[in-house]
C-alpha cells in the first residue's frame, strides 16, 4: 500500500493527462507561456513523482510569446501506442493544435506536426483495439459547442474528411464543454469531459456509447466529480478536467486539476494536479468513492516505489549546472539576455519592462510585432507559505532595475528591485495591478495598469541579499548583507492584490529573478549568485 498526498504535483501544473506503460506512469501538464513547455512527470506508484523533462524545448523549435501569461500552451493529452509516446496540445501563440512524438518520454521529442485540420481546443488522441487512431475535440456548430470525433492517420498526421458530432454536455446549454478524453472498457466507449468553465463551477461528466462514433448517452448521475456544491470556503475548488488510467493492479484512477484556496476563495498558485481512485458501478465510473470529493490523502493498493529524483519543490540553484527541472523562462528566450559564468547567473537589462500593456490574444497582426523577450527566470510557487532568497550584485544606471518578482501575470505582480536616482541607490517595492474590461481572448479587450511604489529604502551600491517571505496572503520583504543579517523593509503586503481573478487569469504564481532597462537600451547586467526557494 502507498499513501497518495494531494496535490500530487503542487504548484502551477494544470490540465494533467496520464498514461501507463507497464508499471510506469507518465503525466503531462499545461505550461501556458512558460518555457520549456509541457512538463512531463514519471511515477511507479502514483504517489511519488519525478519531473523527467519537457515536450517542447529549443531543440524542437518551441515558440511561445510572453504576453499576458494566460496564453500559450494548454491542455495536452499524452498517450502511448506501439513504441511511441504522443502528445497533442494547443499552442495559442501560433493558434494551432500540434502533435509531438517520441520513443522516450524524457525526450528528445519530435518537432511539432501542425494539425491544420484539427479545430477547437483540448483535442485528445485515442487508439482503438484495431490500432485505428481517433481525435476527439471541441467545435462550435450553430452557436453551440459540441464534442467531435475524427479518424486520424498517425502516419500522415491528418484527419479523415468525415467528422462526427458525438455529444454536447451533461447539463443543457452547459458552459464550456471541453477537455474530452475517450476510453474503451468492456462493451462501451466512454467519453469524459469537463464542463462549467475552469473556475468555481468546473465539473467532470461522462457519457458512453457502444459505437465509437456515437451518439453518446450521458450518465444520469452526472457530474461524476465537482466541488462547486462545497462553496467558496472549500479548501480545494475548481475541480475538473480529468483523465483516467487503468493501473497495473487492475484498479482505475483519475487525475484532474484543482485549486488550493488561501484565506477564502483565493487561488494564488493557480490550478494544480490532483488524483483520486475510480471504481465502476453499474457500468459507470464513480470517482473518490464513499466521499464523492477530492481528499487530501488516499491509500491505494500499489507498492510504494520512491524515485531518485522525487519531487521536493525545495531547492537551491546550483548555477554551475543550472537544472532546468525547477527553473523556467517567461516566453521563448530568443534574445541572448542570460549567461552562466563563474557559478553565477547574469541577466541583461532588456528594454522590456514588467509592466508593459497586455496585447489581445486574438489580434495576431498586433502581437506579431512584439517578439521581444522579458528578462525573467524563476520557479513556480508550490507552497502556501514559502521563502525566496537571492544574492545579487547589480550597479544600475538610471531607468534600470533588477531584483525579485512575484509574478501573477504581465503587469500584475510585486517587485522588490534595486534602482538608481542620481548618485543614490534604493530598494523599492512596487505593486503593479491591472484591470481588464473583457477576457484577453475576447473581442473588445482593453486593460488599465497602475503601478504603486509602496516603499523606497536607501541602500549602498554593493552586493545584497534579497528575501521574500509569504505566509498565507501576508508578504514581507527583506534585505541584508548576509542571510543571517536580514532587515524587514515592508511587512504584510497583501497577496490578494495580484490574484488571477482580476485579470481573468488561469495561471499560478512564478517567483523569479529579473532585470530590465524599462524601455531603454542597455548592456548592463544583474549578477545573481544565490537563488533559493523553501516551502513550509
Image (cartoon, rainbow, N blue to C red):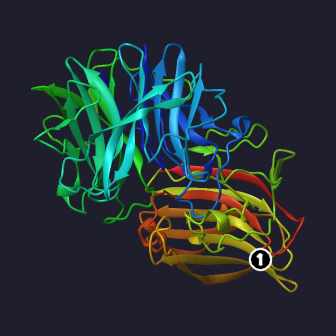
Image coordinates for residue 49, horizontal then vertical, percent? 47, 30
Is residue 416 shown above or below 185? below
Q: Is residue 109 left or right of residue 523?
A: left
Image coordinates for residue 319, horizontal then vertical, percent? 76, 43
Q: Please report the residue visible at 80 percent of the width from the left and 72 percent of the height from the top.
A: 517
Is residue 25 shown above or below 511? above
* Secondary element at tag 1: strand
Image coordinates for residue 15, horizontal then vertical, percent? 42, 44
The residue indicated by pointer 1 is 419
Asked where in the image residue 301 lies, by quadrant, the reply is: top left
Q: Please report the residue visible at 66 percent of the width from the left and 68 percent of the height from the top.
A: 366
Image coordinates for residue 394, horizontal then vertical, percent? 82, 66
Question: Observer-nearest residue: 414 or 179?
Answer: 179
Q: Is residue 404 left or right of residue 284?
A: right
Question: Is residue 381 visible in the rendered structure shown here?
Answer: yes
Question: Is residue 481 visible in the rendered structure shown here?
Answer: no
Question: Observer-nearest residue: 474 or 295?
Answer: 295
Q: Is residue 321 left or right of residue 160?
A: right
What count of labels does the image hold? Answer: 1
- Please tell me how crowded label 1 is: few (under 14), some (14-19), or many (20+) other residues with Cα within 10 Å: many
The quadrant in which the N terminus is found is top left
| Furthest residue toward right | 523
Q: Is residue 426 left or right of residue 48?
A: right
Asked where in the image residue 263 lies, by quadrant, the reply is: bottom left
Question: Observer-nearest residue: 149 or 521?
Answer: 149
| Furthest residue toward bottom | 422
Q: Please report the residue visible at 45 percent of the width from the left and 78 percent of the height from the top.
A: 437
Is residue 455 shown above or below 373? below
Amino acid at each position: 500500500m502507498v499513501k497518495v498526498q494531494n496535490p500530487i504535483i503542487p504548484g502551477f501544473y494544470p490540465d494533467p493527462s496520464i498514461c501507463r506503460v507497464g508499471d510506469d506512469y507518465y503525466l503531462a501538464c499545461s505550461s501556458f507561456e512558460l518555457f520549456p513547455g509541457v512538463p512531463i512527470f514519471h511515477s511507479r506508484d502514483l504517489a511519488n513523482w519525478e519531473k523527467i523533462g519537457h515536450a517542447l524545448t529549443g531543440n524542437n523549435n518551441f515558440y511561445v510569446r510572453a504576453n499576458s501569461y494566460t496564453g500559450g500552451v494548454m491542455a495536452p493529452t499524452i498517450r502511448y501506442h506501439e513504441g511511441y509516446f504522443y502528445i497533442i496540445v494547443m499552442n495559442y501563440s501560433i493558434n494551432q493544435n500540434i502533435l509531438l512524438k517520441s520513443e522516450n518520454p524524457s525526450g528528445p521529442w519530435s518537432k511539432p506536426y501542425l494539425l491544420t485540420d484539427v479545430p477547437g481546443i483540448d483535442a485528445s488522441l485515442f487508439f482503438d483495439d484495431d490500432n485505428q487512431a481517433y481525435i476527439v475535440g471541441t467545435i462550435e456548430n450553430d452557436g453551440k459547442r459540441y464534442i467531435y470525433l475524427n479518424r486520424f492517420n498517425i502516419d500522415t498526421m491528418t484527419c479523415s474528411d468525415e467528422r462526427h458530432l458525438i455529444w454536447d454536455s451533461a447539463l443543457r446549454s452547459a458552459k464550456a464543454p471541453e477537455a474530452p478524453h475517450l476510453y474503451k472498457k468492456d462493451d462501451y466507449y466512454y467519453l469524459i469531459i469537463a464542463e462549467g468553465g475552469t473556475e468555481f463551477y468546473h465539473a467532470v461528466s461522462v457519457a458512453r456509447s457502444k459505437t465509437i462514433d456515437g451518439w453518446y448517452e450521458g450518465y444520469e448521475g452526472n457530474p461524476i466529480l465537482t466541488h462547486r456544491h462545497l462553496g467558496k470556503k472549500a479548501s480545494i475548488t475548481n475541480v475538473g478536467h480529468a483523465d483516467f488510467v487503468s493501473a497495473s493492479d487492475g484498479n482505475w484512477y483519475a487525475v484532474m486539476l484543482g485549486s488550493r484556496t488561501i484565506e477564502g476563495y483565493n487561488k494564488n498558485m493557480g490550478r494544480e494536479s490532483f488524483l483520486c481512485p475510480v471504481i465502476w458501478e453499474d457500468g459507470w465510473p464513480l470517482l473518490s468513492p464513499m466521499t464523492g470529493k477530492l481528499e487530501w490523502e488516499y491509500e491505494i493498493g500499489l507498492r510504494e516505489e520512491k524515485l531518485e529524483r522525487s519531487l521536493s519543490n525545495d531547492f537551491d540553484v546550483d548555477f554551475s549546472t543550472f537544472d532546468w527541472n525547477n527553473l523556467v523562462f517567461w516566453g521563448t528566450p530568443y534574445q541572448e539576455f542570460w549567461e552562466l559564468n563563474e557559478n553565477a547567473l547574469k541577466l541583461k537589462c532588456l528594454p522590456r519592462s514588467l509592466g508593459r500593456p497586455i496585447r489581445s490574444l486574438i489580434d495576431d497582426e498586433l502581437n506579431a510585432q512584439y517578439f521581444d523577450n522579458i528578462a525573467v527566470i524563476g520557479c513556480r510557487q508550490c507552497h502556501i507559505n514559502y521563502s525566496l532568497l537571492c544574492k545579487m550584485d547589480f550597479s544600475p544606471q538610471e531607468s534600470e532595475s533588477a531584483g525579485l518578482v512575484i509574478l501573477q501575470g504581465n503587469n500584475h505582480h510585486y517587485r522588490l528591485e534595486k534602482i538608481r536616482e542620481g548618485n543614490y541607490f534604493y530598494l523599492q517595492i512596487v505593486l503593479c495591478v491591472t484591470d481588464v474590461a473583457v477576457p484577453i481572448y475576447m473581442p473588445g479587450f482593453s486593460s488599465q495598469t497602475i503601478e504603486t511604489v509602496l516603499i523606497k529604502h536607501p541602500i549602498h551600491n554593493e552586493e545584497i541579499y534579497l528575501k521574500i517571505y509569504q505566509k498565507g496572503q501576508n508578504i514581507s520583504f527583506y534585505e541584508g548583507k548576509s542571510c543571517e543579517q536580514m532587515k524587514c523593509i515592508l511587512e504584510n503586503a497583501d497577496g490578494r492584490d495580484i490574484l488571477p481573478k482580476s485579470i481573468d487569469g488561469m495561471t499560478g504564481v512564478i517567483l523569479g529573478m529579473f532585470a530590465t532597462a524599462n524601455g531603454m537600451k542597455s548592456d548592463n547586467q544583474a549578477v545573481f549568485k544565490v537563488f533559493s526557494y523553501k516551502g513550509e
